Image (cartoon, coloured by chain):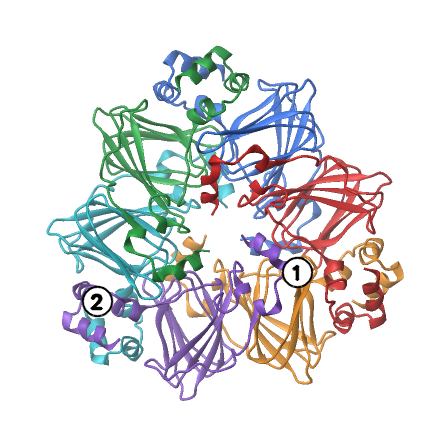
Chain colours: A green, B blue, C red, D orange, E cyan, F purple
C-alpha cells in the first residue's frame, strides 16, 4: 500500500503535499460559535496512507466546539490565541478538563468524548495534529438528535431518562 | 509484546484462556432494561495481546442498550433470542438501522455511535465479538450528562441547543 | 483505506452490515460430524477493513472440528448448547485443553493448532468471534494429506515417521 | 514501546545487535535430517520491537524440514547451497511447490503450512528472513501427534480418517 | 498496552495530558539559526500509546532546519509566521519543494530527508503534527559527520566522493 | 487487503512467489565498489501485503555501501563471505559499529543511518532480510547532494557548516 503509492513518486508534485489558507479564520456565525477547518486527505491527496492530518478551530467569544469523538484518531491541540476550557470524559466517566492559555497544549485520546469552549471575550484559535489522514468526527448532539432518519424518540427518552417531550424539543432545535 | 508473552507458554493453563457462566442472564432490572456481560482481558487474562473479546447483552422487554461508542473496537453481534432494533449513525449523520430476529447478524463499525432495543415482549439475548481485548465503552448519556465533575451546564445547553433548565433536568436524572 | 471506504458512507445500507440465518444448524452429516458457518467479509461486505467476523459451529454427537489453524485471527468461542472438549497446542507442544459446558468461553490464540469435540450424545453449538474480516482456515489433515497436487509420500512418511503405506492409506481416505 | 526502548539508546552496545556463527552448519543427525538455527530476539536482544529475524537451515542429503507453520511471520528464503523442493499449501488446499537451486528465492506467506526437502546427495543450506522478532514455529507432526498431554486418539483417528491403531502407531514414533 | 494503560484512567489528571509554553520562541542563536521545541511523550506522559505528538520550530532570518529524517513519523506543518522554503527528497532523488507563506500547510512523508529554510528577514514560526509519541530525529549532518565515535574518514570520502581533507574539514566544523 | 488477495489463491502459481539468480554477484565496478541486489515486491509479486523482502550486497575489496536509511524497514544481515565493518548511528549520534566475519549477523533498526564497508582484499557478500515488501532506500549522499532539482547550495553550506565552494565541489562529483 504505502509502498506502492511511492512508485508514483516519479509523478508527485509539491501541490500534492500542500495547501494554502489555514491562517484564514473560519466563519463562527453559527449556533455554537465555532468553526473547524480540516486539513485531511480530502484536502491534500498526498496524505493518503501517511496516517496524519491537521485542523484549525476558530471560536467566537464563548463559542464551543460541542462534545464529539473521532473514531480513528487521537488529537493534540495548541492554543494560538485566546483562552479555552477543554475536557474529555474517560471511560469511567471522569471529566479531565483544564483551562488553557495561549501556548498551552492538550491531548485528547482516541475515541473519547471531548469539547472545547472559548472562555473569553476575544476570538480564540487552535491548531490540532491528528494521527489519521481521515480522522472523522462524530458530534454527539447531531449524531444522537439529528440523524436521518432520526433515532426513535422513546429510545432517546429512555437513554437520557427524560420524557419524550424533551427529546422532541431537542430534536426540533437541530 | 505478543512474542514474549508466549515465552511463558510453559506455564499457561487452560484457566488462563477460559471462564464459565456466559449463559447466565444479566440482571436487567435497571433504568434501561438491559445488561452487558463483558468477557475481556479483565475476565480472561490470556486475552492479553490477542486483540479479541466477547460480550453478552440481555434485554428485558423493550429494554435498550442506549447510544454508545467503543473507542477501540468494531462489534459483530448475533441475536440468540428475541427481536431487536439496532442502528448506528454514520459520520454524515445517517442512521443505518435494522430490525433483527433470532439468528440475524449485524456489524457496528469502530468508533460510531450505536444502540440496540428489544422490540418485543419477551427477553432478548445477543452475543457479540469484538476486536480488542479491552474494547472500552462510552455511553453517551452518562459521558455527557453524568461525568464527575460534570460538564458545565451552559456548554451542554449550547451543544444540545436547549435551555439550561432542561440540561439540569437531564443531569438530575442520572 | 479504512478511511476512504467511509466516504461511501453516503450510499451504504443496513444490508451491507447484516445477514440472516445464523440460528439455522449447519449440516453435520459429513465425515467429522461438524459444520462451520462463517460470517466473514464474503457474506457481509461491510466487514471490509473492520478486522472482525463471526462463526457458528454445529456438532453432531461426538462430532469434531478437526485440528486446524487460522493464519490471520485469534478466536473466542462460547458454547450455546452441549458439552465440548476443546484444546490448542502451544509452540512448545503443550496441549491446553478443557471440557466446556453451556455458557463457557474459551480462547484460541492466533496461528495455533486447535480443535473442538462434542463429548455428548446431543448436538452441540458454539458461536465464535474472530479478529479478521477474512480469517482463513487451514485444516491440518486436508492441508497435509489432501492437497492438489499432493505432498510427496516420502516427505510425509519422514515427517510423521511412519512408512509410506500408512501415508498412502491416509491420503486415500480423503 | 518501540519509542521508549530507544531512550536507552545511550547504553546500547554493538553486541546487543549482533551474534557470530551463522556460517556453522547445524547438526542434521536427527530423524528428519535437517536443523534450524534461529536468530531471533532470544539470541539478539536488540531485535526487540523491530519485527524482524533470520534463520539458517541445514539439510543432510534428502533431509526434510517437515510441514510446519509460523503463527506470526511470513518467510523469504534463499538457497546458499544444494537443491531443494519447497512448497506451501494455500487455504483452498492447493500445493504451491517448486524445485530450487542455489541462488533461488522462495516466499512462504504467513500462517500457511510449508516444508522444504533436500533433493540431492549433498548437504543443502538456506538463509531465511522473517518479519517477526519472535516468529514461533508449529511443526505439524509434533503438534498433532506429540503434544503433552496428547490429543485423544479418537479425535485424531476421525481427523485423519484412519483407525486408532494407526494413530497410536504414529504417536509411538515421536 | 493501550488498553491497560486506560485502567489507570481512575488516577490520570489533566496535567498528564497538557503542558504550557509552546507560544514561547525557541532560542535560534545557534549555527543554523533555528530551534525545535518538541512536545512528545517525554514532555507529556499521557501521550504514551497514543501515537501522536507536536512540535514548534522557530527560525531566525534565513535560518534553516537542516536536512533530517524522522524514523517513526510523517509530519504535517503549518506556517504561523513568516515565509519558508521547504522540501523533501523522494526515494528516486527528486526534490519536492515549495515556498510557503503564513497559513500554508505542507506534508513530509515518513522516513524521507527534508528541510525548512526561512526565506525572509523576519523570524518565522511553524507548528507541526506528528504521528508518533516519540518521533525521533536524525539530523543528517550530525549523524554522518559528528557521531561519537566518528565514521571513518575514508568511508565518508568515498560516500561523498570527495577527498579526505574535505571530510576532515567538515568533521572539524561540528 | 491481505485477506482478499488470498481469494485469488485459486490462480497463484509458484512463480509468483520465487525468482532465480541471487547467487550471482552484483557488478561492483562503480564509484563505491558495492552493488545491492534487491528482492522486493517489484521482483516477486507474491510479496505484496506480506511485509517482507530480501537483499544481497556485493562488495569489491574496500568497497562501501554508503550511509543510507530505509524509511519503512529494519534490516538483519549476515556475512556470507569476507570481512565487513558495519555501523549505524543512534538518534543521539552514537555510532554503534562492529567488525563482522563470515557467519556474523548484525541488525540495523528502522529509519537509522547505516553503512557497511569491506575491510579486506577479497570480495565480500551479505544476505539481508527486511520487514517490508517495498523497503525503499535513501542514500544520504545522493539525496542531499544529487537530487533533481538540487537543494540550494547555501542551505547545504549551512547544514554542513562548510563554505559554498565545498558544497558545489561535492555536488559536482555526483
The correct choice, above or below, for C90 with respect to A116 in the image is below
Residue D159: horizontal and vertical position, in percent? Answer: 80, 55
Q: Chain of mark 2?
A: F
Could you give the CA–CA distance between mark 1 and mark 2, rounded to whole angstroms?
53 Å
Residue B107: horizontal and vertical position, in percent? Answer: 58, 36
Q: Which residue is mark 2?
A: F160
**Residue at screen point 75% across, 59% down:** C142
Do discs 1 and 2 belong to a common subunit?
no
- Answer whether labels 1 and 2 touch (C-beta < 8 Å): no
- Could you tell me if residue D41 is visible in this image? no
Q: Chain of mark 1?
A: D
Residue A105: horizontal and vertical position, in percent? Answer: 30, 39
Q: Quadrant of the C terminus of chain E?
A: bottom left
Q: Which mark is residue D90?
A: 1
The correct choice, above or below, for B44 with respect to F169 in the image is above
Q: Residues within 10 Å of mark 2 (few under 14, many from 20)?
A: many
Q: Residue furthest left?
A: E121
Amino acid at each position: 500500500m504505502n509502498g506502492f503509492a511511492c512508485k508514483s513518486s516519479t509523478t508527485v508534485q509539491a501541490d500534492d503535499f500542500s495547501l494554502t489558507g489555514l491562517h484564514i479564520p473560519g466563519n463562527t456565525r453559527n449556533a455554537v460559535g465555532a468553526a473547524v477547518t480540516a486539513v485531511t486527505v480530502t484536502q491534500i491527496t498526498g496524505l493518503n496512507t501517511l496516517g496524519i492530518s491537521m485542523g484549525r478551530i476558530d471560536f467566537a467569544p464563548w463559542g464551543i466546539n460541542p462534545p464529539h469523538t473521532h473514531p480513528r484518531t487521537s488529537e493534540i491541540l495548541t492554543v494560538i490565541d485566546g483562552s479555552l476550557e477543554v475536557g474529555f470524559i474517560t471511560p469511567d466517566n471522569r471529566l479531565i478538563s483544564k483551562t488553557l492559555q495561549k501556548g498551552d497544549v492538550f491531548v485528547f485520546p482516541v475515541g473519547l468524548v471531548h469539547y472545547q469552549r472559548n472562555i473569553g471575550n476575544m476570538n480564540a484559535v487552535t491548531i490540532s495534529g491528528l494521527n489519521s489522514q481521515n480522522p472523522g468526527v462524530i458530534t454527539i448532539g447531531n449524531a444522537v438528535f439529528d440523524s436521518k432518519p432520526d433515532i426513535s424518540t422513546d429510545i432517546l427518552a429512555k437513554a437520557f431518562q427524560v420524557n419524550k417531550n424533551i427529546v422532541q424539543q431537542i430534536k426540533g432545535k437541530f
